[in-house]
Image: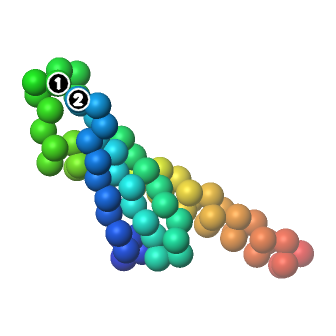
Amino acid sequence: MSTEIVKEEYVRIGVKTTVCCLTLRNGFEITGTSACVDPDDYDLEAGKGWAKKAALSKLDEYVGVLRQQKMYCQSLEDE
């Protein structure tokens, strides 16, 4: 699925939260967030990694739904 990602954007929100926005080739955007407990421990690169992982996890769920729908539609055609 990573080949579908055409753009990655990251932003720090507040003092301890990182937001990742992934834009897919079809224009769909999906976000993920990460945050640390102590603002003194904030690390942008670590935050980016965790936020991207969260966004990709959401994306995997959407892909699963689409695959299931495709299988369902195919089963209806086979009846």
Q: Which residue shows up at 23% across the image and 30% down it?
A: 16
Q: Residues within 10 Å of mark 1 (few under 14, many from 20)?
A: few
Quadrant the C terminus occupies: bottom right
Can residue 57 be seen? Answer: no
Side of 9 relative to 61 (left or right):
left
Q: Residues within 10 Å of mark 2 (few under 14, many from 20)?
A: few
Amino acid type indicated by mark 2:
Val
What is the x, y in percent for residue 19?
Answer: 34, 45
Can residue 64 be seen? Answer: yes
Side of 43 relative to 16 (left or right):
left
Quadrant the N terminus occupies: bottom left
Q: Which residue shows up at 23% across the image and 29% down it?
A: 15
Foreground residue among 69 and 14: 14
Disc marking residue 15: 2
Foreground residue among 5 and 2: 5
What is the x, y in percent for residue 78?
Answer: 83, 78
Q: Which residue is mark 1?
A: 39
Foreground residue among 47 and 63: 47
What is the x, y in percent for residue 25?
Answer: 46, 76
What is the x, y in percent for residue 64?
Answer: 56, 59
Q: Which residue shows up at 84% across the image and 78% down it?
A: 77
Q: Secondary structure at mark 1?
A: helix
Amino acid type indicated by mark 1:
Pro
Mark before the other along the chain sequence, 2 or 1: 2
Is 19 drawn above or below residue 30 in the view shown?
above
Is 30 drawn above or below residue 5 in the view shown?
above
Is 44 drawn above or below residue 25 in the view shown?
above
Q: Secondary structure at mark 2?
A: loop
**Identity of the residue furthest to the front in this view:** 14
Is 54 drawn above or below residue 41 in the view shown?
below
Asked if the residue under mark 1 is in contact with the one under mark 2, i.e. CB atoms within 8 Å, the reply is yes
Q: CA distance from mark 2 to mark 1?
A: 6 Å
